[in-house]
Amino acid sequence: MNQLFPFPPEASLESRGVDMLYFAMVGVSFLIIVIVFGLIVIFAWRYRAGSAALRTRLPAFFSREVEIGWTLATLLAFLGIFAWAAGARQVHFAPPENALNIRVVAKQWMWKFEHPSGAREIDALHLPMGVPVRLNMTSQDVIHSFYVPAFREKQDVLPDRIVTLWFTPTELGTFPIRCAEYCGTDHSLMDGEVVVVTPAEYARWSERNGDRGLPASGAQRFAALGCAACHAARSGIAPRLAGLFGSRVRLEGNRTVVADDAYLERSILDPRADIAKGYLPVMPSYRGVASSEDVSALIAYIKSLRAGGKP
């Protein structure tokens, strides 16, 4: 954008639709302003003191038709804009199954990111261009809001809950991250940057900064937390974990869900949210027991278990 309209660049696949909706609403608002002020000027001139304008009372049917007409027109305009906006955002309720899953932990006053390879960052987020990215986010303290203006994406991050946000970066470069929810004394300093690189460069960065020992660390935490007591192959108390990642899990109520990163994290921190069909809700929550690093290691360990393997 030029200096007259200093908008952030459109750096995600979703940003173009958001901008089109924004400018459409601005255009509708401008049209309404022109009509209202135009009528004010016309009526002020037409019915000025001393003019020969007819000032008799309008017929009742005329007033009724005008009233019904502008009410219906306003309602239809509202429904049209609502349907447009709802349709544009509906896609965000179904992130692609092949999306790159990244854990995000917000805390006063920083953003912590954990990649599937075990690579960790604070206030910086490396992403591959053209690859769908899903952020699984939670807060350690108060409500924060993850906001990337260039992506036109904003999502409140809540304590004791896991919320998701997904998008597809389309431009190489560095883009600012903001916290869009007042979260305390240094709220204005809670920022960071998204660094979008080529997929090949991201793969090299992830390999260079990854933690190859993460699954082994997860196996140790798995044993230390006593998880094997219920998730052993023949216990029958809890579902087997070998081959679980990426599969479809049938839940109570005949719902199904894909066992992705978000599902595994939710099962560790809030196990009663998705109860596997045929099992009792006996698993305790590990919120406050397993740290963010523990959760990442446990997920990496579960992902490493192949069908037929042993937890």
Image (tube, grey):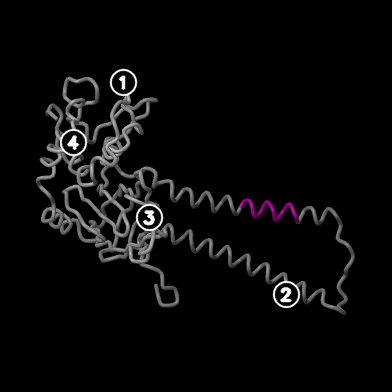
Most extreme residue toward the bottom is 50
Q: For mark 1, give the secondary structure.
A: loop
Report the disc number at residue 278.
1
- Helix, strand or loop at label 4? It is helix
Kindly report which numbered mark, 2 or 3, lies closer to the viewer in this rendering.
3
Residue lying at the far right of the rendered structure: 56
Judged by depth in the image, the label closer to the viewer, 1 or 2, is 1
Q: Which residues are magenta?
A: 67-76
How far is the residue under mark 3 from the one under mark 1? 37 Å
Q: Residue at x 15, y 29 (%)?
A: 307
Q: CA distance from mark 3 to mark 4?
A: 29 Å
Image coordinates for residue 76, horizontal then vertical, percent: 62, 51
- Disc 1 marks a residue whose amino acid type is Gly
Please name the residue that numbered disc 4 is placed on.
Answer: 302
> Quick one: label 3, few (<14), some, or many (20+) residues within 10 Å?
many
Query: Amino acid type of disc 3?
Result: His
Q: Position of residue 52 (x, y in %)?
A: 88, 76
User: In this rendering, is residue 204 above or below 297?
Assistant: below
Q: Tell me the distance, in whole angstroms, between the alpha carbons under discs 1 and 4.
A: 21 Å
Q: Which disc, if any, is residue 144? A: 3
**First-in-chain label (1 vs 4):** 1
Q: In the picture, residue 39 is in which quadrant?
A: bottom right
Residue type at mark 4: give it.
Ile
Q: Earlier in the sequence, mark 4 or mark 2?
A: 2
Q: Can you say which quadrant of the picture contains the C terminus? A: top left
Tell whether position 73 is magenta.
Answer: yes
The tag earlier along the polypeptide, 3 or 4, is 3
- Which numbered disc, 3 or 1, marks the residue that appears first in the sequence? 3
Examine the structure image and report whether residue 262 is included in the region drawn in magenta: no
Which label sits on residue 41?
2
Mark 2 vs 3: CB contact within 8 A: no
